[in-house]
Image (cartoon, grey):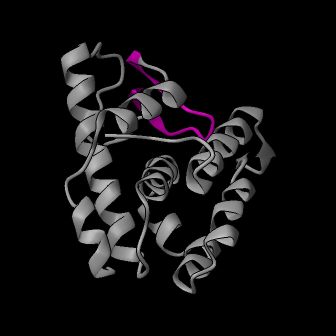
Amino acid sequence: MHPANKVFIGLVGASLLTSATLWEGTRYSSYSDLAGVLTVCQGYTGKDIVRGLKYTPAQCNAFLKKELLVHSQAVLKCTNVPLTLNQYYAFTLFTYNVGTAAYCNSSLVKKLNLGNYQGACDGLLKWTYAKGKHVNGLYNRRVYERQMCLGTLHVKD
């Protein structure tokens, strides 16, 4: 982790929570997502999900905050260059969606860690497939994350 990124540790602000809810939506009963993964609330895929159980808004908010914190820490762990708040939030949203291993092992992180911020932000647009099929919803989400990453969509917290 780059020392400049230590300022973000534990930061899961309102803009990040709102953005995650915007793209994930909220479903209080479990369902299988596009990739067939058991999911609930705002995209939560933990092993503790019970099929058929209805979850409360409070449970969903707790899941979201916990998972965004976990995924934001993974972004910091795998990123060796300083990030802006916009970049930190964009990569956290992305990591929340694709998973820690996918982020940390991606070509976009390799570009990022070489200082190629533009290439890393542009690399988000390659992640628009589920089970080998292009998904317009994922494309729209990646455009949003890219705009956030490049600073053309400003966040504040």
Q: Position of residue 123 (x, y in %)?
A: 69, 64
Q: Is residue 117 above or below residue 110?
A: above
Q: Residue at x 73, y 41 (%)?
A: 139
Membership of 33 in magenta stretch = yes
- Side (left or right) of 3 relative to 31: left
**Quadrant of the image occupied by residue 77:** bottom left
> In front here: 136 or 35?
136
Give the residue drawn at x 54%, y 30%: 23
Q: Which residue: 73% across, 54% down?
A: 125
Residue 44 appears anywhere in the view = no
Q: Quadrant of the C terminus?
A: top left
Residue 7: x %, y % from top left: 23, 64
Give the image location of residue 124, x and y in percent: 66, 57
19 over 7 or under it: above or below: above
Magenta stretch holds residue 154:
no
- Classify residue 144 by image quadrant: top right
Which sits in the foreground, 45 or 136?
A: 136
Farthest residue in the bottom direction?
A: 114
Task: Identify the residue at image location x=51%, y=65%.
Answer: 103
- Asked if residue 122 lies left or right of residue 57, the reply is right
Q: Decide whether the magenta segment is chiefly helix, strand or loop.
A: strand
**The N terminus, quarter of image:** bottom left
Is 60 placed above or below 146 here? above
In the rendered image, the vertical position of residue 135 relative to residue 150, given as above or below: above
The residues colored magenta run 27-42
**At which x and y percent is residue 147?**
64, 47
Q: Quadrant of residue 138?
A: top right
